[in-house]
Amino acid sequence: MKILVTGTAGFIGSFLALKLIQRGDEVIGLDCINDYYDVNIKYGRLKRAGINTYNIEYNKIIQSDKYENYRFIKLNLEDRENLESLFKAEKFDKVCNLAAQAGVRYSLVNPYAYIDSNIVGFINILECSRHNDIKHLAYASSSSVYGLNESMPFSTSDNVDHPISLYAASKKGNELMAHTYSYLFNLPTTGLRFFTVYGPWGRPDMALFLFTKAILEERAIDVFNYGEMLRDFTYIDDIVEGITRVIDNIPTPNPNWSGKNPDPHSSKAPYKIYNIGNNNPVRLMDFISAIEEEIGKVATKNMLPLQAGDVPSTYANVDDLIEELDYKPNTPIKVGIKNFVSWYREFYNI
């Protein structure tokens, strides 16, 4: 297949691109390489796939030095004209949209970034997919859409009408927009609600990165909600395996859907939503203990209240993933943390 993967300088997108390349798909990666966090990490991810980061120019396709079936383009999703030209020229079979402005806390201080990337950018992806005969559009949603829902584990059939951050609202908006296009234009779409992704090459604004950096530098770590947090930490390899299976599994309409069915997340449209999570929530304090054990140091802890936009617990129901795609994430937390700390020490030469 020929697949467009957006967000390939990002954490999940860089791993997905490598997996698709290595299994033989022709892949074009796209990213705007913004400075939301250290661009050196983004460049490092691109270099893993053979992209010469000294040659990157806006709207110029670069051939990988390592993989003949991989090319990269620096482009903003908001750039409708050039995005349309890319779709017309390359004639993709499928699209996986992982590009987005990430982060719950950042959405409290820079809301416009989320509208530009996650709403305007996503409608451009939908329009390009509609007009270029894309066989399947998979896209990143988020576990944050569950918002104030306290029913555990979170199921895709749960109500998600109570988001508590603009980031979450933008992701719920993506799901609604995708359903509309699936129904009106018969465009198969699948949304992926990711649960706390972690692992090597992860984002510097995520807990594992922040904790590891602070402990190694012998600084105190901030522990929110006084440590009373549960997170369904999901290892990057498990996330990517789930995405790959979703890309290969094109959703079909359920003509019997009425809203009264026991399967409310199906639809008359070719539309689907999956949770991708470890299905095994971990106490935040246990997570911190595992990091301390791997590093060999105990952290000083600043115990703080719950931050605005955060939820105390996440826990994924992955029954659909198991039943329909024969897959369940299963990497143990200690294995994932060990791999991250090893990468961190190597990347920063510690």
Image: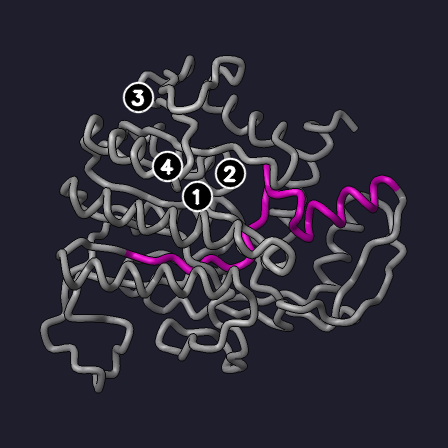
Q: Magenta part of the protein: which range? A: 190-217
Residue 4: x percent and y percent? 31, 35
Residue 333: x percent and y percent? 62, 54
Residue at mark 2 to residue at mark 4: CA–CA distance: 19 Å
Which of the image's four quarters has the N terminus? top left
The amino acid beneath tag 2 is Gly
Choose mark 4 or mark 1, whichever is in front: 4
Residue at mark 4 to residue at mark 1: CA–CA distance: 13 Å
In front: 258, or 107? Answer: 107
Q: Which mark is residue 270?
A: none
In the shown orientation, is residue 160 left or right of residue 218? Answer: left
Q: Residues within 10 Å of mark 3 (few under 14, many from 20)?
A: some
Residue at mark 1 to residue at mark 3: CA–CA distance: 21 Å
Q: Quadrant of residue 191?
A: bottom left
Choose mark 1 or mark 3, whichever is in front: 1
The amino acid beneath tag 3 is Asn
Choose mark 3 or mark 2, whichever is in front: 2
SS under mark 1: loop
Q: Quadrant of residue 159?
A: bottom left
Q: Which mark is residue 79?
A: 4
